[in-house]
Image: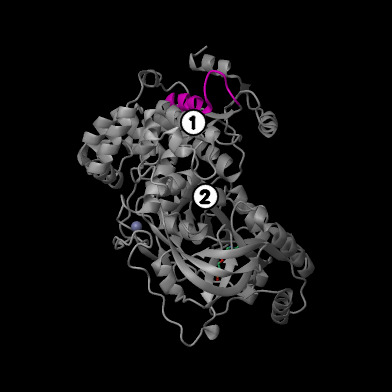
Amino acid sequence: MDVLQKIQSLREELNQHNNNYYVLDNPTISDYDFDVKLSELQALEAKHPEYFDENSPTQRVGGTITKNFETVKHDSRMYSLDNSYSKEDLLDWENRIQKVLGDVPLEYICELKYDGASISITYENGRLVRAVTRGDGFQGDDVTNNIKTIKAVPIKLKGNFPEKFDIRGEIILPFAGFEKMNQDLIEIGETPYSNPRNTASGSLKLQDSAEVAKRPLDCLLYSLIGNNLPFQSHFEGLDKARSWGFKVPKQSHLAKNMNEVFDFINIWDKNRHTLPYETDGVVIKVNDLHLQDELGYTAKSPRWAIAYKFKSEQVFTQLNSISYQVGRTGSITPVANLEPVQLAGTIVKRASLHNADQIEKLDIRINDTVFVEKGGEIIPKIIGVDLEKRPSNSEETIYISHCPECKAELERKVGEANHYCPNFYGCPPQIIGRIQHYISRKAMDIEGLGGETIALLFNNGLVKNYADLYELKKEQIIPLERMAEKSAENMINGIEKSKNIPFENVLFAIGIRYVGETVAKKLAKHYKNIDAIANANLLELVMVDEIGDKIAQSVVEFFDNQENRISIDRLKSYGIQMEVSAANDTSVSDKLSGQIFVVSGVFEKFSRDELKKVIEDNGGKVGSSISAKTNYVVAGDNMGPAKLEKANQLNIPIITEDDFINLLNGN
Ligand code: AMP
Ligand code: ZN
């Protein structure tokens, strides 16, 4: 086989594996084997630039920067959909259609209405050539480079596809991925995203496609557009699209009549919350394409389709007051205090207002009657104000200018949505939040001490800094509320034990803005000890793998601060780990590269965290739950029965900690 053939066969194979994994949900090789093949292809492409192909699977990682997205006219317009809210509306719609078409029997396709960002993707000769956002329906933005990083979108088709066509669908962010992104943000003290849909559509307009590649976006497709396409009905079209490699949701359903449409609606109205992503309704389409043609379009939407909107659970209530919360990093979040009201099975008293812009946009005022809705998110949101019920003497809400906790004047950086309290060292919730972060599980993991207790200690003047924890005496703790000899002892022991926590956790714990768990690991690995990090300048820091300007800047600022330096020196003097321990450092290898482990139960030779660390230090990954991607489950005592069953079901080897040590030593 010559080089070109080898390259082509690897590309084809990798495309198929991507399809198996992301579209069919049925991977047939391990991640490790996939990575090996991908590296092989990368190496060949690097050696043979003459065979470069922008649609090679190696291009999926992104890396192109788009400063301005080019405006592109849609070959055929992207229409909206008419909405309906009841079965009567749907019967009316059917009547209107029947009037145009006469008394032909009508079949419908029922699809879920996905809540994301719509996209139109053009394929020519089986290759993805362009992806354009909906824009105003006539023209949109060319986001091809970003779309190519989404693995569920095929870049090369298989089977017997038409020469040229557009396929349309929705770019969505499933709940799990959205929550993971938010967890990562919260961990470094950033404001989380407000909902999956906005995050999905915002992702499409990111300038750096490598950033898009990191986001867990998905793409669901539902319509084909082109000349002389090889099918007569919408349903056949969906089937064909599946066979060419597209992700067409399997819920799409052929209904023989309107009653079957109602059945579909009833089923999904009840079950929609079990889906991994947000859906706000059902789209009903006439199946026969000739009939679709005959029906045509109104000024704004097809006559042959209609959306049915699920009733979102919504109530109105009164806004009693707005309070402002100060987070660990000083970020201010306005919160609406509502007259308690029953909504979707819970009593709602509060709703987030996100930031000053949101308040302005809603023009929300004290004593307003507001509409509250519970969507996919956990925290209910205010979607509007009933202006007719507004008291005549109501006054516009003026956003606070000073911190409600410490009275410092608030700041708002250009381009940031939130206001900040800059009084980092004097603002109680920031101080408490920082110590709470310090003791948290992924940081110093201090047992016997919780978030409430930190507030209690602070309020009693016992700690104002995480270093103060190490000076605490039992006698000071016992007199406090809900404290006793035993709990005080546990607390002191827990604090003492934290002196053994590895340096990388310490680095995460001290709360440098933007330094999350992963970044802390990177920095620890690179610099080995705290002094080296403290003395690094901006230029050196940005040279470290995955450390960008924002993080580097924040690290420098942290160590420029005298108070921080003092705290760090104190931690050092108490014996906190301020360097990578020799034992940890030598055990770094690539032996477990590409392998995914799930750790379950209690072990003798390691703590769970140690075990996880050994896996990661040797190039492996630790998964949080067992899936088809897991290579091994390392089981200790008391492994959960659900995990055991799952592992057996998926045929994943379950190994003991001794097996694991053997594996690591290459036996
Ligand atoms: P609207 O924006 O409310 O007018 O609804 C039209 C939009 O719904 C389209 O632009 C699509 O982005 C979106 N949509 C979501 N799911 C579907 C579906 N199954 N069929 C058609 N459109 C859909
Ligand atoms: Zn403050």
Q: Which one is in front, 463 or 241? A: 463
Name the quadrant containing residue 473.
top left
Disc 2 marks which amino acid? Glu
Magenta residue span: 602-620
Marks 1 and 2, how far apart at CA: 20 Å
Return the x and y of residue 3 as percentages of the image width and height.
40, 29
State the quadrant of the N terminus.
top left
Can you identify the residue that label 2 sits on?
179
Q: Which one is in front, 29 or 654? A: 654
Can you identify the residue that label 1 sits on?
621
Mark nearer the viewer, 1 or 2: 2
Element type at mark 2:
helix
In-image side of 535 versus 510 (left or right) = left
Which residue is depicted at the point 59% across and 25% down? 602
Q: Can residue 533 be seen in this view?
A: yes
Q: Which one is in front, 14 or 115? A: 115
Determine if the magenta segment contains residue 606: yes
Q: Quadrant of ligand 2?
A: bottom left
Disc 1 marks which amino acid? Lys
Q: Is residue 233 visible?
A: no
Return the x and y of residue 396 as percentages of the image width and height.
41, 79
